[in-house]
Amino acid sequence: MTSVAPVATTPGGSTKTKGGAAGRPSPAAWLVAVPFLAFAGTFLVYPTVLVLFGAFQDSDGGFTLGNLSTLFTGVVFDAFVRSIQLSALTAAIGAVFGALLTWAIAVGNPDGMLRRVVVAGSGVLAQFGGVPLAFAFLATVGFEGLVTKFLRDNAGIDLFAGSAWLFELPGLTLVYTFFQIPLMVIVFLPALDGLRPQWREANASLGGTTWTYWRHVGGPILLPPFLGALLLLFANAFSAYATAAALVSQGSPIVPLQIRGFLTGEVVLGQENLGKALGLGMVVVVTIAMGVNVLLQKRVAKWVR
């Protein structure tokens, strides 16, 4: 719903917006926004500018395109491929299972206990990441985790008989899915709640079937928000760092860990700008994903007003 600022009529019959010209924020509004703007500028804009300029500088501060060419060669390119594969896989798993869980609570009682528990739990678990999440999985399915020891002692099953999968890409896939599914519930639930009962009733009154409804009404309406949520989950996994850093101690299989190696490596110094080039590559990938998401949200906005 669009809010309209109060207007006042001048003696001459013209109108003016209270607090200033129409559409222009008042000084008080800017004052309230100062803390947020300062925070965003310090932790978002300033680092982005440093990454943008540093990606085109060599170790002596001169202009170069050599850092960007590194993105398409060797282990760095492989890290980008693995990061995209990891993000796409966990986004797909999270989107499918998250959508099914969202549907289960959306068709139930809107004031029921199931919906309240799932929504509250999703809000917590979607933000549960980093070192605590890595520790939780280590304590559960690590080499000496609770589940690992139980299966080994009681069923003769060794979860790590083949390899140390928990500390490689398969393990990251499992751990990332843990917070991708709750995030999907939070993001996709408003779209399902936006399906109006009148649309199904209109379909039935015109002789349509359930398949007709989902083929021509529900499906086209839910597809854009589903794809938008899928892209959001992709960007969320692609930019995740703390969980992988806490779980993977050897090697740098994904881009965030590669950046860590370039910025903090002690073997080969002077590679900070290579890390900034990788950061610029990540910014480009996430920007593309979020740009497509914005276009999808604009397309479906008219249905959920």
Image (cartoon, rainbow, N blue to C red):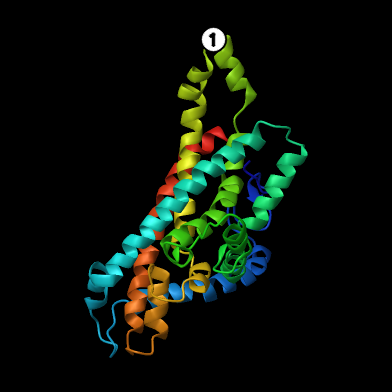
Tag 1: amino acid: Leu
Q: Is residue 169 left or right of residue 132?
A: left
Rendering quarter of residue 250: bottom left
Above or below for 290 versus 254: above
Q: Is residue 253 left or right of residue 224?
A: left
Q: Which of the pair 30/37 is nearer the observer?
A: 37
Rendering quarter of residue 190: top right
Residue drawn at 32 percent across, 78 percent down? 274
Rendering quarter of residue 266: bottom left
Residue drawn at 61 percent across, 61 percent down? 153
Above or below for 208 versus 199: above
Quadrant where the N terminus is found in the figure: top right
Residue 85 rendering spot, x and y as whole percentages: 37, 56
Residue 157 rendering spot, x and y as whole percentages: 53, 57
Residue drawn at 42 percent across, 51 percent down? 89
Q: Which of the pair 182/47 is nearer the observer?
A: 182
Quadrant where the C terminus is found in the figure: top right
Q: Which residue is mark 1?
A: 206
Residue 296 rendering spot, x and y as whole percentages: 44, 42
Q: Which of the pair 127/82 is nearer the observer?
A: 82
Residue 139 rendering spot, x and y as whole percentages: 62, 67
